[in-house]
Image (cartoon, rainbow, N blue to C red):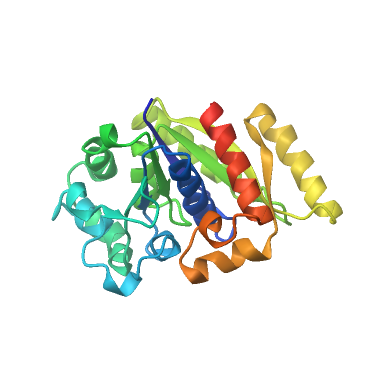
Amino acid sequence: MNKVIAITNQKGGVGKTTTAINLSSCLAAAEHKTCLIDMDPQANSTSGVGLEKDNIELSIYDVLLGNRSIREVVLPTELSYLNIVPSSISLVGAEVELVSMMARETRLKTAVSHIYDDYEYIIIDCPPSLGLLTINTLTAADSIIIPIQCEYYAMEGLGQLMSTVKLVQENLNPNLQIEGVLLTMFDSRLNLSRQVSEEVRKHFNNKVYNTVISRNVRLSEAPSFGKPIILYDIMSTGAENYMSLTKEVLAQ
């Protein structure tokens, strides 16, 4: 069964890109054909799988603006079962350029439909906002994973995100589901982490994954080497966490 999963939360620094990179990499390592689409102008998913941002000639920007087909933009990665549709800084201007275009909310959905049958999983890394790029992503996705950091103000802004999801469900994508809620930056030594975990589980019930992503130095280091955690340090806690999450996603 093919599935398009968006990793979204308009708050920055909650582990969206880390999750997008490492979930897609673990799926690929388990020999599931996977495509990672980087919808964030910062292009951190692009560099996080080993591509040089400055050397990207074609990106998702060219696809959204209708200059190229998505097949022309897809690139291979170090993992044989993982491809990526890279991002670039050009995407910053896409929000403005898309405003005057026909079917502006469904341009990513149309693009994804051309590669949907090529992959078992398509993982989309969203920008930290609720603008037109995120609306495009929610419209293209079958489901969403919401990373929530175990820190102060963890639940802040989630009401706005859920309102946006509801609007997309009502007007653009009635089949959009919440795949799961992922607790990130968990520190078992802190009461705060445990309190946030309890609060999130109370709010989202069985939608919260059993796996939590612990704070892990190796996980933080991996992007600077352009590697997913399973290629950087497969024995690390971060690698164990994301392999565990992948098992839960596959079980769904």
**Outermost residue, left side:** 67
Return the x and y of residue 91 as percentages of the image width and height. 30, 62
Residue toward you, 145 or 131: 145
Direction from residue 69 to residue 5 in the image, left or right: right
Which quadrant would residue 118 be assigned to in this image?
top left
**Outermost residue, bottom side:** 54
Residue toward you, 66 or 24: 24
Direction from residue 58 to residue 77 in the image, left or right: right
Return the x and y of residue 175 as percentages of the image width and height. 40, 25
Residue toward you, 216 or 136: 216
The residue at the point 30 percent across, 58 percent down is: 95
Return the x and y of residue 32 as percentages of the image width and height. 41, 37
The residue at the point 21 percent across, 48 percent down is: 70
Direction from residue 69 to residue 42 in the image, left or right: right
The residue at the point 48 percent across, 50 percent down is: 20
The residue at the point 68 percent across, 54 percent down is: 237
- Up the image or down, 102 lies above or below 60; here it is above
Which quadrant would residue 113 be assigned to in this image?
top left
Return the x and y of residue 6 as percentages of the image width and height. 44, 42
Direction from residue 76 to residue 193 in the image, left or right: right
